[in-house]
Image (tube, grey):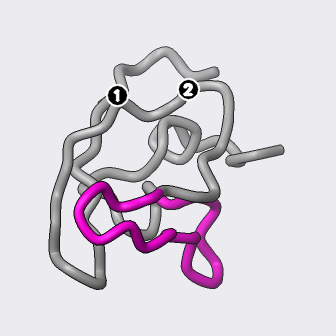
Amino acid sequence: MTDHNFIPDSDITCPECGHTKTETMPIDACQWFYECENCKVLLKPKLGDCCVYCSYGSVPCPPIQMEQSCCS
């Protein structure tokens, strides 16, 4: 792991209804699914992204921020 700081929280925005919620991202696991608390749609990563935070979050997941492989 590199020794620089990462941003632990991400504002995840639902592409269906536009609802945004700040969530603390897991450091040691990928989050492949996220249920919007507003419209209940189940979000999945977009093609080429490793997790829902990389697809719908305001910042990428911690492993990507630290220039590592996500989910390896």
Residue pictured at 30% horizontal, 37% vertical? 23
Q: Which residues are magenta?
A: 35-52
1 and 2 marks in contact (CB < 8 Å): yes
Residue pictured at 23% horizontal, 63% vertical? 38
Residue 48 in the magenta stretch? The answer is yes
Marks 1/2: CA distance? 8 Å
Residue pictured at 41% horizontal, 52% vertical? 60
Can you give x and y, in whole percent of width and height, for residue 30 in the image? 65, 44
Can you give x and y, in whole percent of width and height, for residue 66 in the image? 51, 35
Q: Earlier in the sequence, mark 1 or mark 2?
A: 1
Residue 8 in the magenta stretch? The answer is no
Q: Amino acid at mark 2?
A: Ile
Q: In front: 63, or 45?
A: 45
Rendered-image quadrant of the C terminus: top right
Q: Quadrant of residue 68?
A: top right
Q: Amino acid at mark 1?
A: Pro
Rendered-image quadrant of the N terminus: top right
**Location of mark 2 (residue):** 27
Per the picture, the main secondary structure of the magenta-coloured stretch is loop
Q: In front: 24, or 49?
A: 24
Residue pictured at 20% horizontal, 80% vertical? 17
**What is the tally of numbered marks visible in this picture?**
2
Which residue of the protein is positioned furthest toward the top in this rendering? 3
Q: In front: 44, or 68?
A: 44
- Crowdedness of circle 2 by 10 Å Cα count: few (<14), some, many (20+)? few
Q: Is residue 49 left or right of residue 43?
A: right
**Location of mark 1 (residue):** 8
Q: Which mark is residue 46?
A: none
Instruction: Look at the picture and state if 58 lies above or below 30.
Output: below
